[in-house]
Structures are given as structure tokens and as C-alpha cells.
Image: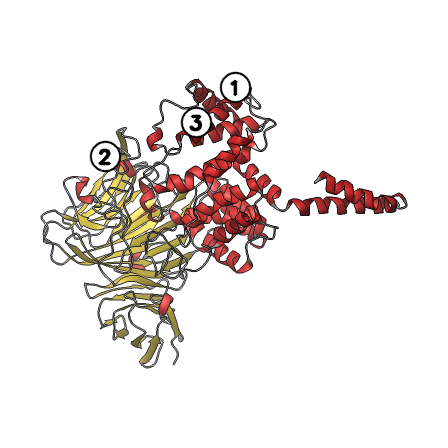
Amino acid sequence: MLAISKKISQILFPLISGLKGLMVLLVLLLINLSSKAQSGPYHVILERINADLQTLVKDKPLADEITRQLKSLNADGSWADIDYSDAQYDPLKRIKDMATAYIRPSNKLYQNAELYGAIVKSLQNWLDKNPKNKNWWYNDIFYPQAIGQTLILMRNAKTQLPVKLESALIERMIRRLKTGDGANTSDEALHFLYRACLTKNKATLDSAAKYLFEPIAIADGKEGVQADGSYYQHGKQQAIASYGRVFAGNSVNAAFYLRGTEYALPKDQLTILINYLKNTFLKTIRGFFYDFNVRGRGISRKDSLSSGLGVMVAKIKLFDPENAAYWDASVKRTSGLEPASYKITPTHHQFWKSGYTLHLRPAYTFSIQTASSRTLRTERGNNENILGKFLPDGATNIQRSGSEYANLMPVWEWDKIPGTTSRDYPDDGGATVLKDWGIPGTTKFVGGVSDGVYGISCYDLDYDSVQAKKAWFFFDREVLCLGAGIKSNSNENITSTVNQAWMRGGVVSSNGVQKNGKGEIWVMHDSIGYIFPQGGDLEISHKAQSGSWYRINHFQSKTELQHQVFKIWLNHGQHPQNASYQYIVIPGVDAAGLKNYNWSTIQVLKNTAELQAVKHSGLDMLQAVFYKAGTLVASGLSLQVDRPCTVYIKDLSAKSPTLYIADPAQEKANIKVLIKLPGLSKSKTIDCNLPTGAFAGATANFQIKE
């Protein structure tokens, strides 16, 4: 490169000698540009990756940990506490940490000779042992990524790694890239990018860029982003912040590293990525914490609900400055600089492809996860999520601060997951997932309707010898939850769990717990109120519960833990044949506010196995779930449908209401609605043509006019 610059200088020197200073500067600039053009984008990308790898590094804790690890390092570069026949994150993570400290001038181990020797020895030991793990992910994704990151860090060292060692490690990184595998493809392509820049190999860089961006597409029914904005992985399984988190992180990193180069993310794919991040992924985070419904089997890992997305979101601004205000607000909200409510816009999203519902308000997040015969239930795999049998049976995540469930899962009673109706087993063994990698759902009538701000979700439950019709009606201050047709012939009591969260503060209720009562009951805990308009056999517990991470994930600690847990549920008894429930959740309220809360604006018109319907007079809307063709007559209105569906009528008493309708079974292209409303002089018949194909199950809307 220096020779090229000298040659250009020699050619231009006679010209330069006769020019003034401005021309000299221009020529020098041309020389510099020529030099960079010759080097290509490799150096720029390496610099960005290197800086990224050192983001948020804390030098003192890092140096202290490395000092401990150096004391236990064997002469051959191995550690006695690591099983190299089943190596996982260590030892490569330790070696990468050592490389990080070695190249940082701010670290006390910077350019430490002993540390350099340890890095070389431990890398050579890894090379000689060539460990393999039974889980392909370590072999094909983590190992080559960690090696590539270590080599990139050491490229900044004054004393470079031995050339032979580095070359051998680069060779060890080579894997055959598997395409069409969603987040896994981008994971593998990331270490292709590392290797391409280390070797300055254009063909490898071409492949890396291609496959890093390949998953950024709408992949109807395949693994990846869906038409409704959700994310599939391991088949038709909702994975928004499990594998979808990997997809988001890798895609953002790739766009960040390659910005401004010939490999920059194309505009159409940028739109898909931004929409996924803004409208789906980031909305599943309340404060610092994920909604537990979107973490998949990762729910069984310690700290799995902690998001830590500040750095990732900050990167997005560099390639999407148009939405800078949104990204700034997200960083502040997820890092604790602002409250969880900061700049939250009320939205309601029914993800018809994956059975997930997300209802956002500044005061709270409320979500639901369900499974249908079109999708897979939340998976168990690699001995993770062992007790998550009931997670897709209408689990409700109710968050205010965001931390209501964080690290509570070891002591959860897993047959009482919030929102679910299930058998009350004598122990958690009944909640064991018996098959790995996803079990299909059992019923087809699962979904809902939405206008983007309000909506309904429904779940036809028929699983584990329990049947029920479950529905949720979403408003501003409150969410109304209905259950009907609850039946089972099993010997266990059948329960509907309202919540199971960290015990915080006291529990206040109207008259304590009323057994078999018919009068209204209200309960308040941790700024969330619960009203039971018809009473019921309500039970509340705020005792300590015990468990370990190991019982739900065999890669986690066996240490026995004990935490105080708030748990509230309705007991339907043994062998119920037509039991029902109704309760209202009011987040963001205190005991006085709950006591004076006027829920009479919400009228339950029907709660049966055929029809569940609610009128909210304050919002002037009607919401209904028809499990079969039928008619609703109530309060001066009549609504008749010729097929099962979910229906929502907005501006009910106006002269021109809006009808929102969807088919949760995703089978019908047309539903006929006969409607008579107070604001209309006569009945209206509406022929509702519904979305089909990838949009089957989505909401259609129709203006009702005289």
C-alpha cells in the first residue's frame, strides 16, 4: 500500500511543486482515498467490530476475574475445572476476556507479558484438543464466533499472535453455512463476516453479507418474520424475543458494521427490520424486562427476562436516523433513565400467525400466549423449559414496572401459570413437557380481532383433559377476562389462575377471601387491582415457595431458592361440567382507587360456551366472540352472524359505527352479519369479505351506514 502511495506521489510531484497549498491538500486527499479504495472495507468493518466488542467493558472487574483465572491455568494452557469433552462457553469466553483486557490501555493488564503467554497457550491448547459438543450450536456457531472475536481483538495488540497459530485458528473457524434457518443462519453468517475481514477475502465477505441479511424478509409460514410481524423458529412457533432476539441482534449488528459500505443493508430489507424492531420486538419490553411470553424455552434461564438492549438500540440510530426520537425514547425507557411508561403509545396487536396478543398502555403491558392446531406449543429442548407444559394455554403477562416475574420461575407453581385454566396437580410433575422441540396445538378457534388500539382475544382450550372457552376483552384502564364451558373428568381440581408474581407489599381485599361467595370481591396487590363481579371460590396465597433453576433447566444451578410469591386463583373443583369465571384486571391503582372503581360501565352480556360478549358504555363499544353461528340481543341492539367469529363494534351509538371482524379459525373467506344498533333506523346486512392467504385470521373492518 505504501509503495502505491509513493508511486502516485512521484507521478504527481512535478504538478504539486507548481501549485499552491489548496491544490496540495487536494492531491493528498486523492492519495488517501486511493489507499482506502485499495484496502476495501475490511479495515473499517474490523474497527467497528473491535469497538463493539469492548462496549460496556468494566476494566476492574474484568482484570480481577482474569487474575483469578490465570492462577488456575495449567502449564499446558488448560483449566482443570473445564470438561473439554463437553466444552460450552468456557474456555473460549475466558480467552476472549483475556484478549479484551490485554489490548485495553485502560486495563491494568494491558500488554501484560504473563497474560499474553496465557492467551497463546490457551488458544494452542484449544486448537490441539479440538473440543466438540453434543449440541451443534456450540460447534457451528459459538466456537467460531468466539474464536473470530478473540482474533479481531488481538489484531489491536502491539504484540500480535504467532502467524501460524492465528492461521490455524482461522482455518478452524470454517464451517458450511446452512441457509434458510432464520436466526441460526444470521448467527453463522456473523462468524463468516469475522473470517472475511481477518483474511480480506472478498468471496467470504460477499457470502457473509448475503446471509446476514437473508433472514430479513417476510417468510410466510417458514422460520423468520411473519406477515403479522411476529417471528417463527423451530417450525411454526412464536419466538419473538428468543430466536427473534438473536435475529434482531445479528441484523442490527450487520447493518451497523456494514453501513456506508457497498454491503449496506438494502432499503426494502431495512424497512422490514425497522418495522420488526419498532412494532413488535421492542414493544415486548417493559422497562428493562421482557414479557415472559416471548422468551420461549429461554424462560427457564436465569436473568432471561433482562433485556439489556441500550447498546443495540443506540446502534440503530446510525443507520436509521429518521426514527431517532423513537430509538432515543426506547433507550431511556429500557435503561432506567426514564420510567417504563415513558412515551408509550396505546396500541393493541393481535398476532394472528402466532397466537400472541400484546396490549400496551402507559400504565401497563398485558399479553397472552395461545397455541392452535396451526402452531406449535412452547418448546422444551436441550433439557430447558422442562415444566412449561401450560405456557401456551392462555398465559397472561401483566407488567407495571416490568420486573413482576423476573427470576421468579424457579419457585413458580407451574400448573398455575398466570391466565391458564388447568388441572391442579399434587406437584409440578404434571406440568412436565413430555416431548422435545414443539408439540402441535389442539384446537383451531384461536385468535382475535383488533383495531390497533382495542381488541379481543379468544382461546378454545382442549388440552390435558380440560376444556374451556377463554376470552379477553381489552380496554384502556382494564382488561376483562371471561371463561365458560369449563369441564373436565380428571380427578384433580380445575383452577383458573389470575396471577402468580413476586410478593411486594401487602394484599388488600374487600372482605378477605370469600369461599363459594356470589357477591363482588376485589383484591389489590402491587398496584394491580382484581375485581370478581360474581365472586367465586377465590384463593390467595402470599407464602414462600421453593425450587431451583435446575428443576426447569438442567444446565442451571441446583441451589435451592425460596421466594415470597403472590398467587391468586379460582377453584372450579373436581369434575366441573359447565363452570365459568369472570374477573377484571385494573393495573395502576391503589386500594382506595380500587374500592371506588366504577366497573358498571362494563356489562357482561353473555358468558357461555357458545357466546361471550361485553359492552363498554364508557368507550361506546361492543365486543363479542361467537363460537358458533348465533344471535346476540341485548340493550337495544341485535347482532347476528352466520359463522363463528370475533366481532368488535366501535362508536356503537353513533350514526356511522365501525365493524371489525375476524375468523380465529382462519377458514372462512366471508361472514354475513345482520346488525341493528341504537343509532341506526333499521337493520343492516353486511357481507364481510375476510383476508385470506398469509392474512387469514387478520381483522377486516367495515363502515356501517344508513
Q: Earlier in the sequence, mark 3 or mark 2?
A: 3
Which quadrant of the view contains residue 314?
top right
Work out whether residue 362 can be spotted: no
Residue found at x 87% / y 47%: 15
Q: Position of residue 235 (x, y in %)?
A: 32, 54
Circle 3: element type: helix
Q: What residue is disc 1 on?
A: 114
Alpha-carbon span between mark 3 and mark 1: 16 Å
Q: Position of residue 354 (x, y in %)?
A: 33, 57
Work out whether residue 226 can be spotted: yes
Say what amino acid the circle numbered 3 marks. Answer: Asn
Q: What residue is disc 2 on?
A: 543
Of discs 3 and 2, which sits in the foreground?
A: 3
Q: Which mark is residue 125?
A: 3
Say what amino acid the circle numbered 2 marks. Answer: Lys
Q: Position of residue 320 (x, y in %)?
A: 56, 52
Say what amino acid the circle numbered 1 marks. Answer: Glu
